[in-house]
Image (cartoon, rainbow, N blue to C red):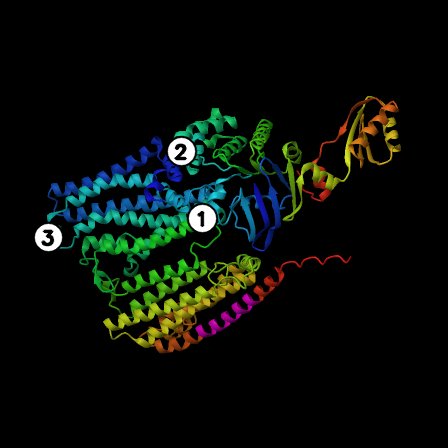
Amino acid sequence: MISVRDLRVDYDDVCAVRDLSLQVNPGEICGLIGPNGAGKTTTLRALAGLLEPTYGEISLNGFDLVTHRAQAVRQMGFMPDFAPVYEDLMVWEFLDLFASSYHVPMADRDRLITQCLQLVDLTEKRTAMTAGLSRGMRQRLILAKTLLPDPQIILLDEPASGMDPHGRILLKDILVTLSGLGKTILISSHILTELSDFCTSVAVMERGRLVVAGRVSDVSEAVLGKTEIEVEVLENPEHCAEILRQIPGISNINQAGDHLTFACDGSREEESRILEALLAKGVRVVAYGRKRENLEDVFLKIGAKEVS
Amino acid sequence: MPLADMIRDNPILIRHMRARLRWQQVVTALVVVLVLSGCLTLLGLLSLLTGDPNSDQTWYGAVVSTIMLQGLVLFLLGGAQVGNAVGTARESGMMDFHRISPQSPSALTLGFLLGGPIREYMMFACTLPGYAILVTAIPPSLLTNGELQVDQLWLMPLVMLVLALLYHAIGIVGGLSVSGAQRRNAGVLVILAVIIFTVLGMFPPMAYLSILAPMVLAMSNGQGFFPFQLLFFGAHLPIVLLSLLHQGTLFVFCWLAAVQKIRQENTPPFTRPVALLFFAVIGFLCLGDVVIRGDTWNRIYSADEGSMTVLLYSLTILALILSAMLTPQEGQFTRGIRQARKVGLPRVPRWSNAAANWPPVLAFAGMLLVFALVGTGICYLINPSLRLGATLAAIFIGVGTVLQFGFLHQYFLLKFRKQGNNYFALALFLGWLLPVIFGLIIAALQADEMIWEAVMCFSPLAGLGLVFHPDNGALFSCIAIPVVIIWNVITLGLMARTVTSLTHGVWIASRPEPAPIPAAR
């Protein structure tokens, strides 16, 4: 579990993170989102013990990062947004370096390295020099290095940057699997649509402050207010839109081809009644359902501007 | 963790062994060194076997060249490798991975220290058989005239290794201290340090900074072309022992600095208490070295004003360097106040690195005063002709210089933030260097010596030495001392005002937000 209380980090005369409090529970994948300069990387580096906070308490699985640093860092694996490697080492030597750093017994190292390489799909590159790896492969190698000591807490700063679609899918699958094993994962990313695929919670930062945090659905509901419904009709969408306008409690009706979206502030029962009304009026519905919580909408609503 | 365990499975050491001892790369380096060392050994042996009348000189040449080859490999190549290894690890972000691994900072430091120059250590090892053969085959004529200290020559590789560790530790600190684009070139800084240390080591009081003096003294025994003796508190000690005492002590503190920088990058290499201890230990060693007997570079050393000048300049410059290291930037200073405020302390602890620098500056000045007075006492006991008035004036200027430097530096860093160091350098140029430049210009215009020296006395740097002038020392003291007093009064006032106002401002600004007023029912 990650527990942060009243965290403040200053760089010279700039306050990068201001009074941030956050908790991420085991099994949770928390997405840390915010525009450039919001303080995401600073927060992750402070959690990793690479930056000394001005003040605040950071506890990793119950170990305070200041008073029990050695135990706290053993709980944690950190992957930065760029992938530094020793370019004069082979891939297996690079992983062995960190196996040794984390006091993995010599007898287990080879097996662990093989497993990690399989996990990130780099088995074929085992004896290749790291200098010859592409950026995406380096990211995967760093991911392997991060997972090698089997950390309970995983901090990932823009892990998918530089990865090809295959790498991103791999990353997503690995994170979901790890979450299922009870690991605590905090991940920062600009690619909000990807985060919404697998994050169970989000924390939105802006100008060093935590604006809102919680489960994705809760944050969406809290920020966006109404539930958004998507309808696909077989024909005559204008007729469908006309019917929707006559139903009380419906707003923001948008039509794009045969697709319509609208906001509804009612309960699930109300959503069901709307569908019944459409069918009763002869609308030929192909698909009907809640629009997936969109982090970009949440983000834009909060006021951030620099989403890539 | 025991040292053996730290070495056995040290990941950084193994990483460097893998990267730098790949057969294809290492074989060329080893062959080159082996051939060079073999040629030198052969040269020494052949001149003996062929009965060459200059065999003594040839043997000297072969031994000195072998030691120089060892120095080139260990100090220059090895130092550059350590600096670059650390600089590259820091630049690439790998150092961050090491910092958050369960490896202790000491183990990481040891890994870089032994692993960075691992190939150079192997190259050094390749020179040892040749060196051993040369020391075994000493020309008989050299053994009889008493110039050679054979036992000291046998121990010379040990001095090389300790000195190499010292340079390499400096390389680690340098690699973690330089910023921006220079990081990757940190090795060049180490080479520069080795060259500067070697040049300084040619002067007897700094003899222990390089291999030159130990090597030459072991081969001349204070006779011949190097006629002086290095004493420690007046006692004759074997040169290797003296070298190891000085270099080992310096290495211990460089090691502590390297560990500190590996642990946390944005901190000074020393905490304030360690810096004070460092100054005290170096002060003690300098006191021991203050009495040097002999005549070299046309300068007779015999516990005179020259010895005191060297002692004062050495300790003053060391105090300035340490004080600059311990002076917090504005960001660090305000952060310290916020931290103190958050945990409910009435003020930042005086010996915290975030507190204003006046406590360590005062401590350095105080220790300088004590060491200088004790040194004066020792010199006066040995040499009653020492001029006490001039010596006390020089001590006053030295102490004042340390104080004004510290106060001014703190003022500029707090007042002008990121530009503080630039403006501070400008102030030092105007206050300390400009009088010297004016003095030199006046000297170039063929003016009276007294006039241009008097102008130079407006700079404490020159004043400290010029007050010992045999004829005009009193006059120069009358100029230099008031200048130092005025500088100190001004800098103290500026520093105190800035520290007080900034502390007050940040203290108020970081006041905890009041609890919301409960709504009326």
Q: Main secondary structure of the magenta part?
A: helix
Q: Which residue is mark 2?
A: A105
Which portion, as a residue range, is magenta? B483-500
- What amino acid does circle 1 point to? Arg
Mark closer to the observer (3, 2): 2
Q: Secondary structure at mark 2?
A: loop
N-terminal label among 3 and 1 = 3
Indicate left or right for B52 with A245 as reference.
Answer: left
Q: Secondary structure at mark 3?
A: helix
Question: What chain does badge 2 belong to?
Answer: A
Instruction: From the top left corner, tell me how far across and down residue B281 is, in percent.
Output: 33, 60
Q: Secondary structure at mark 1?
A: helix
Query: Does residue B117 appear anywhere in the picture?
Result: no
Task: Give me the C-alpha separation between circle 1 and circle 2.
Answer: 25 Å
Q: Which residue is mark 3?
A: B144
- Give the image quarter of residue B305: bottom left
Q: Along the line of sight, which residue is nearer the eye, B300 or B311?
A: B311
Task: Give me the C-alpha separation between circle 3 and circle 2.
Answer: 59 Å
Instruction: From the top left corner, tell me how far across and down residue B455 is, in percent.
Output: 42, 72
Is disc 3 in contact with disc 1, using a CB cutoff of under 8 Å? no
Q: Which residue is mark 1?
A: B263
Q: Along the line of sight, which residue is nearer the eye, A217 or B121?
A: A217
Instruction: From the top left corner, tell me how far across and down residue B470 is, in percent.
Output: 31, 75
* Residue at point 50%, 40% (across, down): A75
Q: On the rendered image, what quadrant is the N terminus of chain B found in?
A: top left
Question: What chain does badge 3 belong to?
Answer: B
Query: Does residue B450 appear anywhere in the picture?
Result: yes
Is disc 1 in contact with disc 2, using a CB cutoff of under 8 Å? no
Indicate left or right for B289 with A99 as reference.
Answer: left
Mark closer to the observer (1, 2): 2
